[in-house]
Amino acid sequence: MNFPNEAGGVILWLQVVLGFVGFLVMVERMVFFQHARTKVADLLLGITNHVRKKAYAEALHEASRARGPEARVVHSILMRHHLDRTNLREIAQEAGQLEVPRIERYMRVLLGVAMLAPMLGMFGTVLGLIEVFMKVGAADSAVAQAALAGGMFQSLVSTAVGLALAIPSYLVYLYLYGKVQRMLHRLERAGIETVNIVCDSREHDRIVSFRDSLEQQAKNLETKSKKPSLGSMVTEQKDS
């Protein structure tokens, strides 16, 4: 018995194709999110230590070695660390926008599977019922009852298969959508924190240099005050 051909026909085969596509999307997205996992806090801590030491080459190496979209955003900012805060924010935003299509890839396909599968099931059921009633109208009463029972079964199979595909597909879509939103939040956080790290390091250097200049001026004044003036030395010589 060729069940797909008898119980649903072309509609059921279309649902099988949709289910296969949805399964491939689920596997691909799961692998992507598993591979893109990055400990943002540890990455930012290492970047902070390098930036404070002005070791931007080491910071770039650590960002390029890390995996995930957050590391790529951090790397883009560090490549242009000499710019001001406003330009660095724009770079962080642009780098984050370039990562969004990768993160949201195939999500609409999975949502489409969840929406189209039950619609195809209902369409197959309607077509099956139309065919059943056409056969019932042209048959005897005994034959009509058997045809109606078999036709109803075959028609409802497509609806059941459509719902069986739509429910898990939509649940997985919601799960993956939550992971997408959390990754976008980490992406934005990594960009903002990196900009603050670079700019705060500059402000710290300015404060330190200003403090050093004040201390140097104080030392110079103290040295001058300790040196005796020429007039006082002449007066002391005359007195002696």
Image: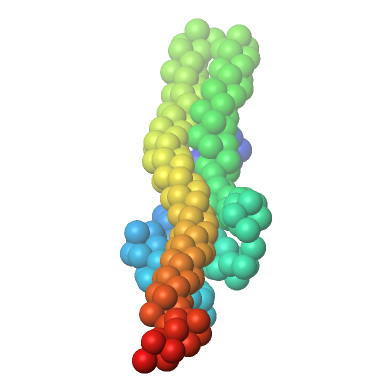
In front of the other: 111 or 193: 193
Q: Quadrant of residue 176?
A: top left
Residue 215 is situated, as x and y percent measured from the top left of the image, at 42, 71
Residue at (54% x, 23% y) in the render: 122
In front of the other: 113 or 86: 86
Residue at (54% x, 44% y) in the render: 107
Establish if 157 lies above or below 95.
Answer: above
Residue 27 is situated, as x and y percent measured from the top left of the image, at 44, 55
Total numbered badges shown on the rendered structure: 0
Establish if 144 lies above or below 109.
Answer: above
Q: Quadrant of the N terminus?
A: top left
Residue 197 is situated, as x and y percent measured from the top left of the image, at 46, 60
Q: In which quarter of the image is residue 120?
A: top right
In front of the other: 185 or 148: 185
Residue at (34% x, 59% y) in the render: 41
Residue 93 visible, this orientation:
yes
Residue at (55% x, 48% y) in the render: 104
Residue 25 visible, this orientation:
no
Q: Quadrant of the C terminus?
A: bottom left
Establish if 232 lies above or below 27.
Answer: below
Residue 189 is situated, as x and y percent measured from the top left of the image, at 45, 50
> Most extreme residue toward the front, as rendered?
239
